Amino acid sequence: MFQRFLDPKILAGIANLELTAKTVVDGFISGLHRSPDFGFSQEFAEYRPYVPGDDLRYVDWNVFARADRLYLKRYRGETNTRVTILLDRSASMRFQSTGVSKIDYARFLAASLAYLAHKQRDAIGFIGFDDEVRDYVEPSSRQGTWLKVLYGIDHAEPGHRTDFAKPFFLFQEMLRRRGIVLVLSDFFAPPEEIIRTVAPLRHRGNDVILFHILDPAEVRPSLEGPRILIDLETGQELEVSPEYAAGAYPARIDAHLEAMRSQAQGAGISYHLLETGRPLDDALREYLTVRQGRL
Amino acid sequence: MGFLTPWFLAGLGLLALPVYLHLLKRHKSTPQHFSSLMFFERSTSASVRQRRLDYLLLLAMRLALLALIVFAFTRPFITSAVPPGFGGDKLLLLAVDESASMGFGDRLPRAKSAARGILEQVRGATRAQVIAFASTTRLLNEPTADPAILRAALESIETTGSRSSLGDLAGALRNLARTANVPVEVHLFSDLQRSSMPPGFAELRLEPGTTLVLHRAAERDEPNWTVESVNAPARVVDPKQSRVEVTLAGHNTPESKRTLELRVNGRAVARESVLIPANGRAIAAFTGLDVPYGFSRCEVAFVEPDGLPADDNYLFSVERADPERILFLHGPRSAGSAVFVRAALETAAPGLFTLDVLPASSAGALNLDRYVAVMLSDPGRLPPALESALQQHVERGKGLFSAVGTATSAVGQVPVAGLAIGGSQYESRAGDRFSTLGEADLAHPAIARTDRWDGVRFFQLFEIQPGNAAVVARATTGAPLLLEWRKGEGRVLILASTLDNDANDFPLRPAFVPFIEQSLRWLAGIEERAARLSVDAALDLQTESGGASVEVIGPDGSRALSLAESARQATLALDRPGFWEIRRAGGRRELVSVNIDRRESDLTLMPEDSAELWQGAPLDRGASTSAGAVTEPRRWQLWPWILAFALLAGLMEAWVASHHYSREAI
């Protein structure tokens, strides 16, 4: 029954982003009981004999009481990572044709991912950008950081046009330690330019996941008559016929998506296309897959 | 160019409606925000320009449609001296009225003059044909472009005594148009009497592609008096007691006193002055008709003729003759039947027959040549000399009526005919058991007008074996009731019952009177024929015996039939007024008077709206006045063309609109 809470339209009715994130993640996890491959980092891994110099905090005193020997308890949770969420808050993210705009969908997804990482006691960071870096929260596993990240996501409003080059140059300076980088954007830029900009993050040892967020109307536009379209970022106007929207445009956007996918794969970057009409679990599953690979 | 109803031009204001609607609903591309235009191109707006072109075309079509409809309502016309396409390949029909009413004043000369004016305009591939019409339509020439032939045909038209029938003319025009294979233009020259119109206007319809132009030869309803009918005996026995009643009528006339004259064989014998009320009728009477023996040509006429002389007199023929003699022989118990027969003859045909009543037993030495027919009322056994004389009488072509009763039944056979009598069938009066007329040849003259012997009951019938006789009627029991036996030219009619009211109640019933009168007329060869007819009536030349050898002398004294025609022709159309003399086989003569149809006397014109409706356009009064008038400018209606263009614009508008909206729906 929690699956229905992954529907973006329902999530849009929840005002509190933290509650939204918890609803998504809890619902998602409840649906994973059949999958033993997924778990939390706090699960038990092994026992090993105590050797001098080990931290006494990890001694299992119950075993010592029964066996009169000192054993240390090892957990997988000790292998925490740094998760940084890069959220595109450019003006084009304001577009919506269904009940949820792209920026809202991205915020739900970002909050859910952040909550999921927080529950795993990963360090969480957040960067909001358009043509500049607008928000920055240093990755940390502290409770206060989680709240800062949540605040940053919650107040990420669409701003100006997207410029990947300038903010990503700064990211490389900020993301000095390896971790997982989640990029949430509509990627309205040439694919080679995007990959060229993102690839250095991967080269530094980060796992990069591109969440390509598009509205269904951007993939398959439907015009009932001639329309003057206004670009949300540039303000440019163009009169478009229904014939073109139904014929040439789908071919061009498909080519763009295919180029994104192939070039991301070529650069070792995970790429995932998300339409705002779809539930969030696909994105969470993608994240966990990548997270699992880092254990 | 002009407009018959120019105030409809105000409807052009409606043109603002589509302009307003198109401006109000003007096509605009709705602005819509989109995330990025990086995948769109400016060249995609080409189809929008196409739609705008469609849109302007649609507006133009709608404006044209409205404007054309408004123009059609204004009934525009152009004036032209020559009809459009007058010199093209088509058939020009000139129909000239030759009915009796065209004899009023100078109507026919004016009509012919107007027709000549039309003929002068014929040129190019147009062929023309001249038609004279009254009750029938006569094609006076084959379609030709030769003006000499056409003028000759036109000049040959004279007034007749026929009545005009526009319905018959329209039928003939339809037939001509169907076979013409080219457009037909009809110019009709007539006074267009209202009485010429058919009962239903639909009978005036013309074939599509036929253009009708009416040329009126009369301007108003002219006054006219007429001798409408004469009621006079066809056969005069006593001239002093004969009476002639004349009905006079006035059409569109004021009250006036008119003097009548009765003429017999061209000699005026009496005069009478009559006050005829305004637009009404009056009756005049002449007492005493002193005519010589034989047929007389009588006439009642106004002393002072009016504008239409053809209907100022009424012709009628009168025959003066002595009564035909009938010998009535009765048996010892049937003397009373003579009373019934005499009463019937005096009622049905007074003066036509005289009845000599004798007992059959004492009639042996009579000279039968004086009698046209003999009646036997249950005579019983006849003296041999009388029966022999009767047989000779019949063989000479004379008639015999024989009623069978108990006395004759006792002899066992019918006199003269010799048919066996088997006995008698008795019915009971008390039990209402009787027989009536069953199967009968109702066309037989003896029972044709007797209303099937309605109510006649036969209580006693004598069973006559038909032998070689024809059974004319049977009783409801199936027994022969009336038989016809022939020998040579002679005819014998046999009634299987009596002529008194002993064996039946026939003499007490109304059917008895016409039965006796018709039977004796038939037996005596006195056929009842109409002696007064109208022009164009058909004269029956057939005789009762089937022979058709008839000689007909027309009003001008010439023979109307050739020798071959007189032998085989069954009817003759009486095409002119006057006295027609018919000489039939056997030396019988008839004198038939023929008068013009009195419907021609009413000179009231066809209502103008009816004429316009028939013509499909307003009447051209100028064309009716003179030949030169036809060259005056005529109005040619344009609204049918404009409506056709409007229809075309409507269809194009529908097509463009469908195309336009189908593009928008993508």
Image (spheres, rainbow, N blue to C red):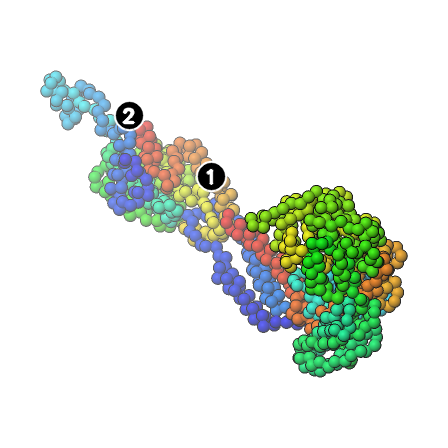
Q: Is residue A114 visible?
A: no
Q: Is residue A21 visible?
A: yes
Depth check, front residue: A58 or B74:
B74
The amino acid pointed to by label 1 is Asp
Question: Judging from the image, what secondary structure is the residue with disc 1 in?
Answer: helix
In what quadrant of the picture does the N terminus of chain A appear?
top left
Callouts 2 and 1 in the same chain:
yes
- The residue that disc 1 covers is A254
Whether residue A107 is situated above or below residue B128 in the rendered picture: above
Whether residue B638 is situated above or below residue A82 in the rendered picture: below
Q: Quadrant of residue A117?
A: top left
Tag shown at residue A262: none
Question: Judging from the image, what secondary structure is the residue with disc 2 in?
Answer: loop
Coordinates of residue A258 in the picture (x, y in percent): 46, 36
Q: Quadrant of residue A111?
A: top left
Depth check, front residue: A165 or B79:
B79
User: Which of the marked residues, 2 or 1, is nearer the chain's N terminus?
Assistant: 2
Q: Chain of mark 1?
A: A
The amino acid pointed to by label 2 is Pro
Residue shown at 21% from the left, 24% from the top: A44
Task: Give the left or right position of residue A290, taking residue B48 as reference.
Answer: left
Tag shown at residue A36: 2
Q: Quadrant of residue B100?
A: bottom right
